[in-house]
Amino acid sequence: MTKAILVLNSGSSSIKYGLFKAEPGGEKLMRGVIERIGAGAEIEDTRGRMSLPLPETAGHMKVLQWLAADLLERLEDVEIVAAGHRVVHGGHEFGHSALVNPEVIGQILELSPLAPAHQPHNLAGIAALGQIWPEIPQVACFDTAFHQTQPRLAQIYALPRALTEEGVLRYGFHGLSYDYIASQLPKHLGAGAAEGRVIVLHLGHGASVCAMHGRKSVATSMGFTALDGLVMGKRCGDIDPGVIFYLMRDKGLSLVEAEAVVSNEAGLLGVSGISSDMRDLQSSDAPEAKEAIDLFVYSAVKQIGSMAATLEGVDAIVFTAGIGENSPEIRRKILERCCWLGVDLDVSANAIGRPCLTTPQSRVSGWVIRTDEEREISEQTCALISK
Ligand code: ADP
């Protein structure tokens, strides 16, 4: 029997999953994604794409029950020995991944209001697996944990001290992705350069930037919640908090309505009025689509400048996640505006998505490195259960 770790990244309408051999660097045995949960779920894996044989409205529990049965049927010679989950917010409490128990579940639940679009779904995955396979240890892996190495000044807001002590801090997110990228830097940049000053741009539906030194996080663009920083698919990124007071006090929006404006109706979607998906904007001729892309690029360039100042220089810039990995046009637009930092773009290497995007003379090297959050969760789970 092959011992394996099941990894779940459970979101509002999708579940990404992976199965890895339960050993450090263990082979990836399977991966897939279930989308449109609650509206006619479909699975995509090595068999292609198909509808799940479930009622249209089936939620996370039913979908995971189906997935568990499907995995058991397909993998006769595999024994699932642990499950690892992505959990977006670990707050102050979790500097590392944690074995799930009722107390840990309570703490994750308490942090839900800080990540309302993610945390409840992460917990739904944990609860469902706990019922389906109660004997299997489950591990929660946090997106905030990687940033706990940041110096205090990068973490605190200029708020009254009592609020800081209560935990109103910049936590930062996408930490599982950044942790994975940090593990890959030596392979691409070389052992010495990997320890230098590196700015990583995770550009997906959610987007953020992380400044690393010695492969540790020293600053990041997201803060107390995942709304801050870059322009995102539907989130506004940097905003004057006064806008929210204006929406509520002068325009009479309720709290829920104001939250929806900045977290679901803003970003690429809000500016373009067309779509939150970068591909749709790139294939549109509308001036609003162009402006949304320009603002996305502008916000990324501004964040790179801020991170470079924090690091007091920069040795490498790395792109990852859906947009970062797949859009030469966005990478080019961003890197062309980093010449002043010492970036000399290799246009043809960028066009074909070579890992190294810059010329040999470039003072700052540019890279595209595919992220793998599921792999990172598997590694963290494996490390914890073997302790
Ligand atoms: P998530 O945050 O949901 O994990 P992803 O990392 O999958 O998101 O990134 C999703 C984003 O990547 C979408 O905006 C999508 O349009 C964009 N994307 C994917 N492929 C391409 C491509 N070839 N060109 C431009 N954008 C792309």
Image (cartoon, helix red, strand yellow):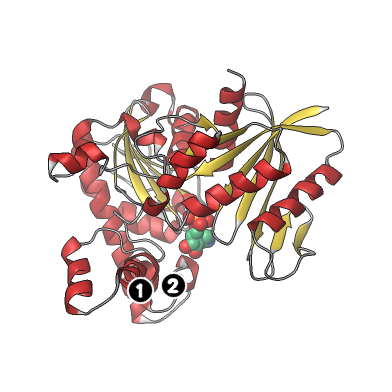
Which of the image's four quarters has the C terminus? Answer: top right
| Residue placed most toward the observer, 272 or 240 | 240
SS for dot 2: helix
Residue 93 lies left or right of residue 243; in this view the side is: right
Residue 270 appears in which quarter of the rendering? bottom left
Residue 79 lies left or right of residue 230; in this view the side is: right
Which of the image's four quarters has the N terminus? Answer: top right
Separation of residues labelled 2 and 1 (CA atoms)? 12 Å
Residue 59 lies left or right of residue 207; in this view the side is: right
Q: Position of residue 273 (x, y in %)?
A: 38, 79
> What residue is rendered at 43% in x and 50% in y?
112
The residue carrying mark 1 is: 270
Label 1: how many Cα within 10 Å (few below 14, some 14–19, many 20+): many
View extreme (top): residue: 387
Q: Which of the two discs, 2 and 1, sits closer to the camera?
A: 1
| Residue placed most toward the observer, 15 or 298 | 15
> What residue is rendered at 38% in x and 43% in y?
358
Q: Position of residue 319 (x, y in %)?
A: 42, 47
Label 2: how many Cα within 10 Å (few below 14, some 14–19, many 20+): many
Q: Label 1 is placed on what type of residue?
A: Gly
Vertical placement of residue 58 versus 31, above or below: below
Q: Position of residue 93 (x, y in %)?
A: 38, 33
Q: Label 2 is placed on what type of residue?
A: Leu
Q: What's the mark number on residue 281?
A: 2
> What residue is rendered at 47% in x and 58% in y?
327
Residue 228 appears in which quarter of the rendering? bottom left
